[in-house]
Image (cartoon, coloured by chain):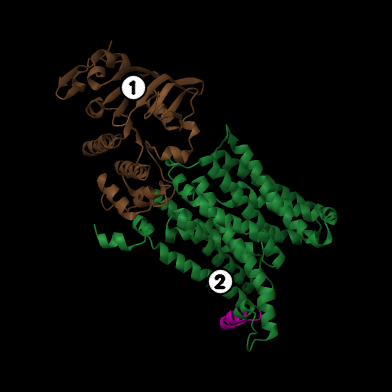
């Protein structure tokens, strides 16, 4: 036994032998690079150094020397809100995926499984078709909020119904939660299909935003609406991490180790529903991030949620903003829906994971 | 006061699927003592252990720790006083052995690498901290889990005795490691803790137990020191086979080749 090794390495790394610290630093650098890239890249490219100058000037309130007003406007008013909404959605969706995988004790779980995403999408398209009169009831400055609020309520509501269905004798049965989630998700998707029939052509185009996701409509208002719920999920994940680690050992084992398993599961589902509901309200449904990002993070920092959750948040920012850069560049000047890009990259990756997993199992 | 400073079941019954699995069982696990549950398959041994650990709901009776009904304690408060070795534990993600131990510890200093390395050494798994749990054999996993619950109890209050619950701890172990587990159980009792174990092997039971409790068809049929309980008529009534019990210092033993086929 090498005593030096034991005393010098970080505690997490002794238990795991994984490059936890290096992995977190790597993901943080990737997230930072993606943010700078999201601000720099576009039809009007601005050098990363200038982006940093503009950001620094905006932060300190100084004048930025040698920066054109046009560059300032593009970075601060056009691309920054988009990057912030993207970062919130990326971090929120990825952490939600990691938390759901922990609750289901299954690395193939996804936030979509508890009905958040399909429920939110259905509520959004229903609002597009039927909601205009409802929006009139709101005071004028809040009318723009009708749609995201409907999406949020739809996501949370679907999840609560599913959680209710899965509760028996005061305990949440994970298998029932899974099947109820699949059933209600399918039902919500069918409902979205019905809406497509009822919708006008113009409305159908708007549906694309909700079902395939996009950062195109990002505004500071949307960022401000999503931020409290996504940040709430990130903060909650800090408190959930220890319990999720124990839950990986089994439900009975987690209880024996001192975890209030029921409280953990309920807290996790509600935090995920709120975070994902708010994300979908801001950007529509962006698939595969919640499934693939935690996997990638796990490959580097290992499955312990205490490091996996922050790693997923950072990598989620990097992957979502990276996908958005691709979505803007591939068919420029047109934009591909973000969900199309994440699915194009995510689905083959997911298949590869499945095959790799099968090779492991036997 | 009654029931102070011990972990006890009073008149406990457990029902599942309309059937009584355990009926009116009373027993006390005391600090400094090893209590072993024996009995035929389906006798309710594991069910009784799960009822006492808080995992199973009771249909009647009560389980108390130092006089306090355990359902009145938070899972965390209970976990500070008792740890449970599961029968066969699958872990959901590709954890290493060291991560499995850390994962079960709710205490903030649970990830102390030196402690994890030392506890793995105690279960004869030195140097296994970074091995993948899902690549280990059944017996090795069992011992990682044992190291995990020993760690859990090490991080608990030092001022009150802690209780170790072992559900068939020797099931997938070779002889040497069966003895390792029982030695650790014995050591826990000798340090002032209490141990409740389900064992199949009557000889191991007789060797390690201060008290043996015989269960059959959900009821406690006999309880006491090995010398009083490992007797031919008790075993025949409980297991439905006639065996011959020999006595050799320090205690009784049962040899399979002495079996008389019943009937």
- Bin the neighbour count of mark 1 within 10 Å (Cα to Cα): few under 14, some 14-19, many 20 and up: some
Q: Residue at x 22, y 18 (%)?
A: B259
Residue at position x 56%, y 53% in the image: A236
Q: Which chain is green?
A: A
For the question of whether residue A288 can be seen, the reply is no
x, y percent for residue A49: 56, 82
Chain to which mark 1 belongs:
B
Give the left or right position of residue A21, taking residue A288 as reference.
left
Total marks placed:
2
**Region rendered in magenta:** A43-54
- Asked if one can make out residue B186 in the rendered structure from this viewpoint, the answer is yes
Give the residue displayed 49% in from the left and 71% down from the top: A29
- Position of A135 with respect to B99 (left or right) is right
Query: According to the image, label 1 marks what residue?
Result: B40
Q: Is residue B190 magenta?
A: no
Q: CA distance from mark 2 to mark 1?
A: 63 Å
Q: Residue at x 37, y 30 (%)?
A: B5
- Mark 2 lies on a secondary structure that is helix
Pick whichever, B214 or B61, lies toward us: B61
Q: Which mark is residue A65?
A: none
Query: In the image, which lettered chain appears brown?
Result: B
Q: Is residue A46 magenta?
A: yes
Coordinates of residue A278 in the picture (x, y in percent): 66, 56
Report the residue marked by disc 2. A34
Q: Is residue B192 above or below residue B140?
A: above
Pointers 2 and 1 within a single chain: no
Residue A272 x, y percent position in the rendering: 59, 51
Number of residues whose C-alpha sits closer than 10 Å to that of mark 2, classed few (under 14), some (14–19) or many (20 or more): many
Q: Secondary structure at mark 1?
A: loop
């Amino acid at each position: 036994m090498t005593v030096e090794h034991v005393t010098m390495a970080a505690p997490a790394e002794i238990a795991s032998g994984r490059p936890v610290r290096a992995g977190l630093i790597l993901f943080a650098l990737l997230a930072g690079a993606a943010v700078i890239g999201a601000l720099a890249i576009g039809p009007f490219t601005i050098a990363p150094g200038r982006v940093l100058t503009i950001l620094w000037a905006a932060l300190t309130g100084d004048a930025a020397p040698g920066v054109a007003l046009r560059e300032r406007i593009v970075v601060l008013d056009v691309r920054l809100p988009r990057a912030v909404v993207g970062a919130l959605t990326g971090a929120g969706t990825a952490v939600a995926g990691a938390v759901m995988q922990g609750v289901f004790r299954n690395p193939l779980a996804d936030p979509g499984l508890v009905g958040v995403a399909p429920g939110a999408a259905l509520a959004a398209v229903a609002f597009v078709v039927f909601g205009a009169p409802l929006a009139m009831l709101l005071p004028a400055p809040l009318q723009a909020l009708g749609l995201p609020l409907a999406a949020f309520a739809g996501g949370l509501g679907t999840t609560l119904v599913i959680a209710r269905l899965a509760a028996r004798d005061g305990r949440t049965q994970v298998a029932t939660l899974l099947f109820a989630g699949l059933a209600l998700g399918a039902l919500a998707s069918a409902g979205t299909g019905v809406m497509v029939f009822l919708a006008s052509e113009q409305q159908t185009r708007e549906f694309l935003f909700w079902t395939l996701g996009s950062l195109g409509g990002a505004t500071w208002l949307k960022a401000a609406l999503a931020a409290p719920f996504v940040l709430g999920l990130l903060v909650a994940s800090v408190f959930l991490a220890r319990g999720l680690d124990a839950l990986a050992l089994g439900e009975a084992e987690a209880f024996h180790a001192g975890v209030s398993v029921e409280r953990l599961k309920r807290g996790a589902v509600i935090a995920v529903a709120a975070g994902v509901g708010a994300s979908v309200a801001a950007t529509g449904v962006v698939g595969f991030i919640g499934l693939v990002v935690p996997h990638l993070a796990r490959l580097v920092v290992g499955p312990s949620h205490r490091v996996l959750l922050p790693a997923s948040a950072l990598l989620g920012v990097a992957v979502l903003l990276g996908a958005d850069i691709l979505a803007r560049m591939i068919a420029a000047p047109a934009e591909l829906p973000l969900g199309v890009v994440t699915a194009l990259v995510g689905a083959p990756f997911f298949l590869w994971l499945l095959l790799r997993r099968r090779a492991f199992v036997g | 006061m009654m029931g102070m400073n011990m972990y006890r079941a009073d008149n406990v019954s457990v029902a599942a699927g309309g059937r009584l699995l355990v009926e009116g069982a009373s027993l006390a696990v005391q600090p400094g003592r090893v209590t072993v549950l024996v009995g035929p398959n389906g006798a309710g041994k594991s069910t009784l252990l799960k009822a006492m650990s808080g995992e199973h709901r009771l249909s009647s009776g009560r389980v108390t720790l130092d006089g306090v009904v355990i359902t009145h304690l938070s899972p965390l408060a209970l976990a500070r006083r008792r740890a449970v070795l599961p029968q066969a534990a699958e872990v959901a993600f590709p954890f290493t052995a060291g991560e499995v131990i850390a994962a079960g510890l709710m205490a903030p200093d649970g990830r102390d690498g030196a402690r994890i390395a030392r506890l793995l050494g105690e279960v004869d798994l030195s140097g296994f901290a970074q091995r993948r749990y899902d690549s280990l054999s059944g017996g090795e996993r069992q011992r990682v889990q044992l190291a995990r619950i020993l760690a859990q109890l090490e991080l608990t209050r030092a001022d009150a005795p802690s209780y170790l619950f072992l559900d068939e701890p020797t099931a997938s172990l070779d002889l040497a490691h069966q003895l390792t587990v029982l030695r650790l159980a014995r050591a826990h009792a000798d340090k002032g803790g209490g141990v409740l174990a389900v064992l199949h092997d009557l000889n191991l039971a007789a060797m390690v137990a201060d008290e043996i409790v015989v269960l059959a068809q959900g009821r406690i049929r006999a309880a006491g020191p090995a010398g009083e309980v490992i007797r031919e008529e008790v075993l025949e009534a409980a297991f439905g086979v006639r065996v011959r019990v020999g006595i050799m210092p320090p205690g009784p033993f049962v040899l399979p080749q002495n079996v008389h086929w019943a009937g």
